[in-house]
């Protein structure tokens, strides 16, 4: 047997190579350097956002665990086109996390907080303007992709990171996005962005608390005699709000803001509705003096005594009419 085959190999010289630092963002990291507007609600949301973690957000985790969908277009014949977002790992990448945080700051900065607006909490900046604010608006010169090529002969702009962050926030229910397709131009009109009650609830704020925070702006505008004026006029190039689905969602935002969706308000509203229905039934069916006295007696005694007396009368006198039943029960309760 040849011993050379089993001889030990000379030690291999190991050379360590330092890998270059991985670049997180394709162009530059997002940042929002402007001071927040002097609105108490915006400043409160900004402070909460500084401690908010995207990766542990219940809405974002639900989206990344199960996936979601976005309504892109509604055709004239009623067909709808959706974009599906597939399930992903629960941990949000650093690039998307930084983009979402800076994007929300820019949205809070440009949102209209006046309750006199037609629709509550609308962002008054377009998506390209938001991208510029956070440094994610990238411009390319013409024919940038190849020498002498005719592709993009007018150049192009890109803010894909911002669009991806908006889709995540929309699919998770934290933002409401209004889209409209223009057939003449063959492209979508400018999107309109609205804050949703789910976003405020994600930050731990109720409708009554939000209304209390907005009250300072309302009082300040009233003292300065400042009339409401929309910061971003509605034009034909913007998506319109005409279908009932969007109107219902936006009206729900105002009802939530006014406290109509709070549990206490809902209980009060339900009790008032039952009282109105009972009063209507009593008005339609006249009540005799005997039955009226019986109802007053019911309210003055413990409920278990009334039920016990009614059950005894039903067992002893089956098939009697209503007036005789009331008289027998009244006799048992008063004696």
Image: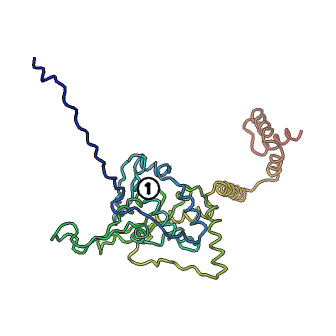
Q: Is residue 47 above or below residue 92?
A: below
Identify the image quadrant of the N terminus: top left
Q: Nearer the viewer, residue 175 or 21?
A: 21
Q: Which residue is mark 1?
A: 97
Q: Residue at x 61, y 61 (%)?
A: 207
Image location of residue 141, percent across then percent down: 26, 72
Crowd class of label 1 (few under 14; some 14 to 19; many from 20; radius 10 Å): some
Q: Residue at x 50, y 77 (%)?
A: 231
Q: Residue at x 64, y 54 (%)?
A: 263
Under circle 1, the secondary element is helix
**Relative to 148, 50 lies left or right:** right
Q: Nearer the viewer, residue 78 or 314?
A: 78
Q: Is residue 164 above or below residue 222?
A: above
**Relative to 73, 228 lies left or right:** right
Image location of residue 110, percent across then percent down: 50, 71
Residue that sits furthest to the left in the current view: 2
Residue that sits furthest to the top in the current view: 1
Q: Is residue 56 above or below residue 5?
A: below
Image location of residue 17, percent across then percent down: 28, 46
Q: Nearer the viewer, residue 161 or 281?
A: 161
Image quarter of residue 220: bottom right
**Relative to 216, 2 lies left or right:** left
Q: Residue at x 40, y 52 (%)?
A: 93
Image location of residue 107, percent across then percent down: 48, 66
Image quarter of residue 266: bottom right
Q: Is residue 22 above or below residue 138?
A: above
Image quarter of residue 237: bottom left
């Amino acid at each position: 047997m040849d011993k050379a085959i089993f001889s030990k190999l000379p030690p291999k010289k190991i050379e360590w190579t330092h890998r270059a630092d991985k670049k997180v963002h394709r162009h530059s990291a997002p940042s929002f350097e402007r001071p927040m507007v002097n609105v108490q609600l915006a400043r409160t949301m900004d402070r909460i956002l500084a401690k908010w973690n995207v990766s542990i957000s219940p809405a974002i985790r639900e989206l990344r665990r199960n996936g979601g969908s976005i309504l892109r277009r509604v055709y004239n014949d009623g067909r709808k086109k959706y974009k599906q977002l597939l399930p992903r790992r629960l941990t949000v990448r650093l690039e998307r996390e930084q983009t979402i945080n800076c994007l929300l700051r820019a949205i809070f900065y440009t949102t209209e907080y006046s309750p006199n607006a037609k629709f509550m909490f609308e962002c008054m900046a377009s998506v390209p303007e938001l991208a510029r604010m956070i440094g994610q608006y990238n411009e390319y010169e013409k024919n940038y992709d190849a020498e002498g090529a005719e592709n993009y002969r007018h150049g192009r702009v890109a803010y894909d990171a911002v669009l991806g962050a908006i889709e995540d926030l929309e699919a998770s229910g934290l933002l409401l996005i209004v889209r409209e397709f223009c057939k003449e131009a063959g492209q979508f009109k400018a999107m309109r962005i609205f804050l949703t009650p789910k976003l405020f609830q994600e930050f731990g704020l109720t409708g009554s608390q939000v209304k209390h925070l907005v009250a300072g702006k309302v009082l300040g505008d009233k003292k300065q005699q400042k009339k409401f004026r929309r910061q971003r006029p509605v034009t034909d190039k913007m998506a319109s709000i005409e279908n009932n689905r969007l109107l219902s969602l936006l009206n729900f935002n105002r009802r939530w803001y006014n406290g109509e969706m709070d549990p206490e308000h809902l209980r009060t509203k339900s009790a008032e509705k039952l009282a109105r229905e009972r009063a209507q039934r009593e008005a339609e069916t006249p009540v005799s003096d005997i039955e009226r006295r019986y109802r007053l007696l019911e309210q003055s005694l413990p409920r278990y005594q009334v039920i016990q007396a009614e059950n005894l009368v039903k067992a002893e006198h089956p098939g009697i009419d209503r007036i005789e039943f009331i008289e027998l029960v009244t006799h048992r309760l008063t004696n």
